[in-house]
Amino acid sequence: MWDRKKREEAVPPHPRKEPRLEGPLTLERIREVFRDCADFSVREVERPGGSGEKLVLCSIMGMVKLERVSDYILRPLAQDDALRQLDNRAAYRRMAEGALYNLLVTERTTVDQVAYDLVSGWCILFCPGESTALSLFVATEDKRAVGPPVNETVLKGARDGFVESLRTNTSLVRRHIKAPELKIREQIVGRQSLTSVDIVWLDGIADPETVAEVERRMARIDIDAVLSSGNLEEYLVDDVATAFPLIQYTERPDRFCGGLAEGRVGILVDGLPFGYLAPGTVSSFLRAGQDKSNNWLLASVLTLLRYLCVLVTLLLPALYIAMATFHQEMIPTRLALSMIAAKQDVPFQTVFEVLIMLIAFEILQEAGLRLPQSIGQTVSIIGGLVVGQAAVEAKIVSPAVLIAVAIAGIAGYTMPSQEMAGALRMWRFLLAVLASAAGLFGVVGGAALLVYHLAKIESFGVPYLAPFAGGAGLGGTARAVVRAPLPWQKLRERTLKTPNRRKQR
Amino acid sequence: MKQVKRMGCLAASAALLLGLSGCKETFDFLPYSRELENMALMRTMGVDAGEGESISVTVSSGEQSKGSGEGNSSAVVLQEEAETISGACLSMQGRGVSYVFYGHVGQLLLGEELARAGVDTSLDYVLRDIEMRLQTNVYLVRGARAGEAIQAAAETGSATRRLEAMENDAGLLSHSMSRSVEDALQDLEETGCTFLPSLRLEGEERTMAADGYGLIQYGQLVDWVDGDGAKGVNLLMGEVDADVLELALPELGKVALRIVGAKSRVEPVVQDGRVTGLTVTCRVDANLAEGAGEVNLAREEIRRQLEEALEQCSRSRLEQALEYCRTWNADFFQLENRAGRSAPWQKEMLKKEWEPSMPIEVRVEGTLRRGYDVGNEFTMRGNTNEDR
């Protein structure tokens, strides 16, 4: 009772004001709204042939392309003979209907709409005697050029990658999927950032309920700003009490479109150079972008290798601890003798050795990521080779521990999704601690806990362990680990609940 | 739901805080850990009859690396006598700083005196002890004590190294093979009889050498099999990878055949709905090793002559081995089971009617595969000059 009261006091109410800006749509009101905004610009223009009253053009500098303002708005206002002959009222109507050259013209009636248009790169034209204003699209399209994705390079595949501009990204998707069934629905998220977020899906292929659920969750988000990926992910997923990623992201439009064609729902966010695909399952995070480009046998072997690497990265340190401290009879005799010889004079217990090395590995990785690429590589070399070698020679750790931790770490890097690799790293620590407490019983208990945890979570109504769970059957399960030849893959995944399962003749 | 979560968090926190209680008993349910470097891994165990009712146990660690390239330390040999094997093993724990670990014992040696008194106790110990492995190879030491063999080996190396070398070379010895505790226990459980490889100590250094087999009946050593009888056991079990058969034939002179493989099949002989005996069919493959220059294997009659000599010798060896079964009226080589496996539909009948004294017909099919002389016309069977 006491703590509930305290909590209520600590969190003030957060009502959403609708409309956001009130008052009549006047130039003075707009000036008031954009008071103390250095980039807010007001330009008065006298219309030739008019009554002498001036038109007012408002814009946010930097958001508009000045050449467009000059060419599309100011030039026709000054030079169009037809406009010159009209009175103010008729000229206003004429401008709204196309006398100005820019592509999009909208008549705005509220301060809210006008303010939003201004920050989106539109010009607002106030005409004397009019209670409404014309909103003219002259936004700048300065953006990063479409280039190859940095983190998802493939040998055989398209070289375009998503950029920060939402409209560019939707155009990239449209270029890959030209079907009119490709639907893009937009929502604005973030009270302060007013970020455009597009929900993309293929009508008739994506599950309508999943689309509706994505829309519902998106509409429920009421935050200040969508500035990073986490701002959206954590609000969209079913369960935040997990380290495992529940939505897949990709920098590659071709992979994004592949997901859409499978029946997933895509999400594109203005300002983020990647797209999300939902729902995300374990198998989707273990599939690499170039699997479909590779020979099916090679792709299958590599997929199996990745599953093996999951086990190695997750279990190897824990198994090492368990076998070296509890179940020495499991170690082959010659290996056991070699380990004993290597561990002579090492002062730490095996569990601390492993934990120290795991933590050192994480520190090295974090340091490498935060630094520029060239320095990061140097840090990795110094940390990995020099410090590792020195630690072994100084008898701080035994070579066997170093090898076990290094193999586990490197196996983690085979994950196509670094978020999945991160989650496995966290569980690796937990399993190592459990192994140090109870040996193999601890490892098995921890693994059972992990399976329980994974079985409990869902992504947009799809079991996270699908197709290994969720009634996909043996065929579905096999398809997750073996990439069959594409002509054999006649059906889309059952777990995605697509209304149209057949995908080829 | 929130309350359940809160309770769960509280329980987890309480469980973690238990560790701070300082009570060791709190975590008694967890297994006990030992650091690997604080262990002495024992590799070979010898069991002998002690004074009176007691049992003497000798264990050896094998040579161990000192680490950092400092070479090997000599084998550690510990010996204790107690009323039981467990008691002797436990009393060894107090002999040094390291924990004596028996999980890597790979060879179990039984002295002759103990084997004649009974091997059950020793095998049963391996079966029941949590550290020992059933895959441990078991040997009988003929005419000596197991402890003596282990200690003698430790003076020049270790018993482990010697026995591992013998195990690796088992394929090249036609009169010995490895038998695990699991094999022996299984045989004893099924028929009450088994055979175990035997060792003898040779020379002044008392070096261990393979020396045929010891026959175990109802848990006790009853006889030794050596010479051609031991080779017959290997033929019977199909465990011959290499053996040289020296023949002195009147027409061909001295010829050496290298036996490169043998496979045996035991089948029941059923007449009038009753099992009247067994047939042992052994297929022996050999190559012409020496005398190839003079012997033209392309000639069918010469090849047949050599194959007949091979068959005759192998038959003699097999019969000598099988004779032990008749003598002791025991199925040392699991003939009944093997016959049952080759004719499963007659297994029940075999079980009822099989007697080790039943007649056993031995059939040998000797095949000469090739000679080693490339200049000879005959190189491989089925590829002669006539064929070309």
Image: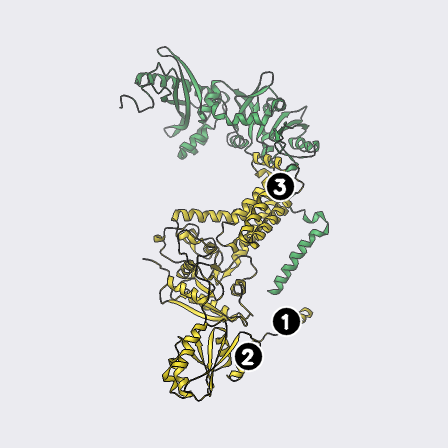
Between B287 and A93, the one nearer to me in the picture: A93
Q: Are discs 1 and 3 both within one chain? A: yes
Q: Which residue is mark 2?
A: A33
Task: Tell me how far mark 2 sits from mark 3, CA to CA.
Answer: 64 Å
Between A323 and A340, the one nearer to me in the picture: A340
The residue lying at 59 percent from left, 37 percent from top is A329
Which label sits in the foreground, 1 or 3?
A: 3
Q: Which residue is mark 3?
A: A390
Q: Earlier in the sequence, mark 1 or mark 2?
A: 1
Q: How far from the left and from the top, in percent, is residue A86? A: 38, 87
Q: How far from the left and from the top, in percent, is residue B345? A: 40, 35
The residue lying at 41 percent from left, 87 percent from top is A49
Q: How far from the left and from the top, in percent, is residue B216? A: 54, 25
Name the chain letter of the residue that bears numbered label 1.
A
Name the chain letter of the residue that bears numbered label 2.
A
Q: Are discs 2 and 3 both within one chain? A: yes
Q: Which residue is mark 1?
A: A11
Colour given to chain B in the rendered image: green
